Structures are given as structure tokens and as C-alpha cells.
Image (spheres, helix red, strand yellow):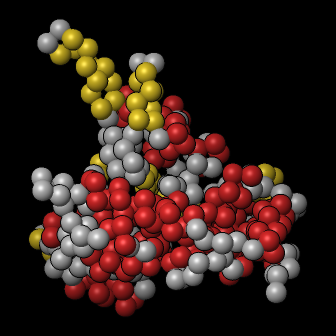
Amino acid sequence: MTDDRPTDATVVDVRRRLGEAVAPVVVGAGPVLDALVVALAVGGHVLLEGVPGVAKTLVAEATARALGARFRRAQFTPDMLPSDLTGTMTLRDGDLTFRPGPVFTNVLLADEINRTPPKTQAALLEAMGEGQVTVDGSPRRLADPFLVVATQNPIEYEGTYPLPEAELDRFLMKVEVGYPTEADEAALLRLARRGLAPAALGEVRPIVAPDAGGETVGAVAALVAALRAEVDQTTVSDEVGAYLLAVIRRTRELPSVEVGASPRAGVHLLAAAKGTARLAGRGFVTPDDIVEVAPAVLRHRLVLRAEAELERFRPDDAVAAAIAAVSVPR
């Protein structure tokens, strides 16, 4: 059943309907869905990190289907060129024409993004930051909305290229996708399948109604515009804003941290906190919203000192230490 009133939707409503739409396909993906909805609502991008087989790719594709958005998958490999992602000029019938790459879509799954060289990784920088790519000297606008969902494997480093800090900083959130609980894994085994593939993936229906031509692109754009307008109206008190700033600045003072959170990290944390507040059905941000979303927003932006890493200190530990060092406003 589709909903033909996308502009009436709220963040809470969209999150609920997305969860219902993908439920026959994925199990226990609540944190990932929360991150994807918040990213859409603020115009950000999401990095999913987890071992193989925890449904990172499946969640991204099922969510795109449920949104009714255009979806493309780019499998990153060591021999992938930037033009394989952005597109290239080709000769057709004697004329040069542009052949768009997979980046020209609404939801781009950048699968195993750390398996391609930095030059190709960097091809995403302009797309993620500016909503455009430059091909043969000419800028070309991407679709709106445009969401990059990148995946990487945290345990296999042979033949990989760690993402440069500048590109990591473009991701709104990094979500760590772990193994499911025993109950979720039992539910996963009960899902209907055709061989190895989920039987219901092709039956995931968009939560927006198509137009007369059967397209849902316009409805998706209207839906996302409504979400962004709602998040933009979320209020932040001076006390809560000062608390967020203190957490950001504290990350730069921790003895375990070589490079703390950047000013862009503060902007992203504020936006994500607004989206998290809306997920909770509130029109204002609380310190709890900041605490809840801070690990996902900051963990990939902090560079730890070598001695801290030797002691198995993690970025999440640094985020927790920064939060613990700042007094909560009352």
C-alpha cells in the first residue's frame, strides 16, 4: 500500500513506514534505518562498517526500494577508475556524448569503498560535498536527493586503501553493523527465500505513490524536502548548543587523540542531533540526543595517538571520554 501524501510525512512517520516496508527482507536493522532516515533528512551520507554477511548491502537496497528512489550499486575494486564512477565522454555516431556513471542516481551503494585506490575514492568527494561531478571540465549536477551509502569490512586489510580523513569527514555518520542478536538471527532464518536470495526483496513496495507514468522520483523528492523542512525547524537552546560545542572542543584536548573533531564535525553533529530529536517525536534537541548520536558522527573523524591504539583505545572510547568530561546542562 502506497501513501500519496508525501508532503504530510514526518520523520517519525517515514521511519515507521520504511521499517514496515523492509521488515519482510531485513531483521534487526533499526540503527541503520535510523541513520539512513536522518541522513536523508539533513542531506548527509552514511558509512556502514561490518564483517561480511551482516546485510549491509541488503539494507541499503531494500531501503532504496521502499523509498521508491533510483538505486545504483558500484562495486569498488583495485582497478576501478574515477570515470567508472562519474561517467565519461564517448563517441557515438560521430558525436561526443556523455555516458553517466552510477553516481547519477538517488541512492548510491559504494560497496567495499576501501578496496579501490585513493584517486577513485576521491571521485566521490565532489559528489558528496557539492552534489555534482566534473567530467571533461564540465560540472554536471546530480539528482536530489542524493545519498551515498558506503560499506567497508573492518577485518580484512590486505589489498585495501584506508579512506583519507578528508573523505571520511564527508560522511555524516559511521554506523558499526555487528552480528544480530540470537532472536534476530532466528527470525532471519525464518524469512522466505528463493535459493539464497530473500524471496520478498522484489516485493518491497515504495512508501510513496507513483505518478501517472509510473515514476516515483518526484514523490521521493517531495518527501525528502518535507523531512528537511521539518528538521530545519527543530530548535536548539543556547545551553544545549554550548554543550555540543564543549563536547566537540573537548575531543581536541584528550591526551589519547592526535586530531580532534573538526568544525564540520560540529555542524554534522548538530544536524544529526536535530534528526535524532525528530525521530523521537520532538521539535527540540536535548543533551540526550547529542549523546545518542555522537559516537556515529565522531568515531570516524578522530585520529588516535599511536600509543592509545597500542593500548586498544578506540575512537568510541575517546567520544565517551569527551562526553564524560563535559557537564550536562540542567
The residue at the point 31 percent across, 20 percent down is: 89
The quadrant of the picture occupied by the C terminus is bottom right
Residue 198 can be seen, yes or no = no
Residue 268 can be seen, yes or no = yes
Q: Quadrant of residue 211?
A: bottom left
The quadrant of the picture occupied by the N terminus is bottom left
Q: Is residue 15 left or right of residue 274?
A: left
The residue at the point 30 percent across, 64 percent down is: 67
Extreme residue toward the top, this view: 94
Residue 292 horizontal/vertical position (percent): 63, 77
Q: Is residue 71 above or below residue 50?
A: above
Extreme residue toward the bottom, this view: 183
The residue at the point 28 percent across, 24 percent down is: 98
**Nearest to the observer: residue 249 or residue 141:** 141
Q: Is residue 250 above or below residue 125?
A: below
Q: In this view, does 85 lie above or below 180?
A: above
Residue 65 horizontal/vertical position (percent): 25, 63
The residue at the point 29 percent across, 71 percent down is: 5
Q: Is residue 72 left or right of residue 124?
A: left
Residue 130 horizontal/vertical position (percent): 52, 39
Q: How many labels does the image show?
A: 0
Q: In this view, does 129 lie above or below 265?
A: above
Q: Is residue 24 left or right of residue 147?
A: left
**Nearest to the observer: residue 229 or residue 197:** 229
**Nearest to the observer: residue 7 or residue 295:** 7
Q: In which quarter of the image is residue 232?
A: bottom right
Residue 180 horizontal/vertical position (percent): 42, 80
**Nearest to the observer: residue 279 or residue 99:** 279
Q: In which quarter of the image is residue 96?
A: top left
